[in-house]
Image: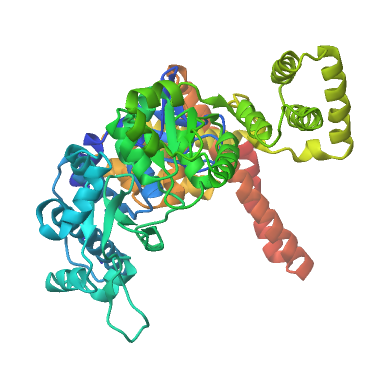
Amino acid sequence: MAGRIPEDVIEQVRAQNDIMDVVGQYVHLKKTGRNYFGLCPFHSEKSPSFAVHPDKQIFRCYGCGESGNVFSFIMKIEGLEFPEAVHNLAQRVGIDIPREEGTSENEKARKRKESMLAAHDLVAKLYHHLLLNTDHGSRARNYLLNRQMQLATIEEFGLGYSLESWDFITHFLEKRGFSLSLMEEAGLLSRKDKNSRPFDRFRGRVMFPIHDSQGRVVAFGARTLGDEQPKYLNSPETPLFNKSQLLFNLHRARAHIRRQQEAILFEGYVDVISAWQAGVHNGIASLGTSLTEQQARLIRRNAESVILCYDSDQAGIEAAFKGADLLVAAGCTVRVAQMPKGMDPDDYIRQHGGEKFKQEILLNAFSLPSYRLQVIRSRYALNDETERMKFIHEALEEISRLPSAVERDHYLRQLADEFHLSLDAIKQEQRKIFKQQKKAGNRDNLKDGWNNSIDSSRYVAEKPMLPAYIKSEQYLLVLMMHSAEIAEQVQAKVGADFAIEDHAALAAHLYRYYAEGYEPDVARFISYLQDEKRLVEKAAELATIDVQAHLMSPRILEDYMEHVIKNSKRMQIEKMEKEKLKYERMGNTAEAVRISLELIPLKRALK
């Protein structure tokens, strides 16, 4: 097993990684009172219930219950073990932690992951070098320059070129000591069958590095220079790369997205890069597939509104509808930028320039209902009366699905004005359609996609009242976290007599924590628990309880301890009563009498 990281080093890493800064890289936070709230990164929600307490250096989601300190957060969001989380955060602030050799499965997995990451980093640099500095890359270089891509942009995105070779990367990695089977698992190599030698997965293509949330290269997108199929080729799913959970360019665009509270979602890498070059720095893209629910939640954690900027063909329209539904379900306000027929964003920017793209396309993006009605409109020849009536009827069906009466009224008025119809007649027809939909049961199955506003409501379930002894145990633990003196008093009077198993375990850890000379510090105590996940979460949950001055008075403290002690005695009495009953049924009168005598002083003590 890897050597244990010294406690003082762990504390140094924790102290230098402010939880606000770390969580802020993943979650858009807004101040409410003394704390900060955002959308939980660990479960889907529309209203923020994820809280960061900067004074205590802890977080807690009041929705799903996830909680802890800065180590817990990184462990959960990056899928790391405790030592890996410490190393991750140490690297972030420039603290060097010497690696110790280990033989555990976790250590092996860590080394495999590090090898994969190192290989991707090396190969990305090699691809980039081949593109910019060799004759082999001249065709790909000219291809990009002819598409008006500037050298500075190529450098910014680390674009590269893979040689038209079956084994160039294979030999490159083998010479540097990388396991070829591991490189195949990492997605850099491929093979025809399990008995054949691995070969280069990417050949003769422009290479687009794909980064994780920490900006590390974990995969590649690759585009052919000609008409070969497939036009785009992505890395396969690997231990590093889950394409449904990452977004192209998010690590680079995140700060701009949060500043503007808006993301521009494109279909492809080249669209994102062209837009970036044109000054649109909040652009991102899904990774070769349709937008997923996980990606939609990831976007919502960083932005309140999204502009979908997809191609204008049928596939682009369908992708926009699907993506819009997912984004609205995640709580985003969605608008759709409509591209001229036959053009994608990259085409438009190259032909008309970035400024016109921003002014004519992005600023004129349709609201989602308007876009849907626009698509319906495109299906009909409105100069024909029959076609016009069909359009109006279908438009009314769509308007009837809008959840907001104000929105319905807005679009009904537009429809009446455009076709010089009576507003009363339009509303009467819409009400008839609405009733038909309701009768058919459609309104119970409406898509979330029509609800184009952020749901600011929050349902809070009524919590059951806890018994006095449980509340007393909780308050005692909270007070102990803030005071070594109180912990000493509780240890002397209550000891291990906590009824709840987790409470007893936390009390034991607190006794040991202070015995080892540590000062009261909630976040440090949680680090002291390290990777005991259940206790970490329980400690963080309790730590969110505010300690009022009057709660630390000797009288209140005495009351809490008395509740706990009395409950312990009650539990002991109940246990002994059951034993007594058992002996009476067995006919063992002597044992039953002995227990009865022992019960007398215990029952007196409760009075």
Between 79 and 2, the one nearer to me in the picture: 79
Q: Residue at x 57, y 45 (%)?
A: 314
Using the rendered view, name the quadrant where residue 102 is placed: bottom left
Which quadrant is the C terminus positioned in?
top right
Between 366 and 180, the one nearer to me in the picture: 366
x, y percent for residue 19: 32, 33
What's the colour scheme? rainbow
Name the outermost residue toward the front.
384
Position of 21 with respect to 364 (left or right) is left
Using the rendered view, name the quadrant where residue 193 is placed: bottom left
x, y percent for residue 544: 45, 30
x, y percent for residue 320: 55, 40
x, y percent for residue 293: 54, 46
Using the rendered view, name the quadrant where residue 395 is placed: top right
Does residue 24 appear in the picture of this structure?
no
Does residue 429 appear in the picture of this structure?
yes
Position of 476 with respect to 223 (left or right) is right
Q: Residue at x 29, y 45 (%)?
A: 214
Between 492 and 509, the one nearer to me in the picture: 509
Number of marks? 0
Q: Is residue 76 above or below residue 412?
A: below
Q: Residue at x 22, y 74 (%)?
A: 179
Q: Residue at x 48, y 39 (%)?
A: 310
Which quadrant is the N terminus positioned in?
bottom left
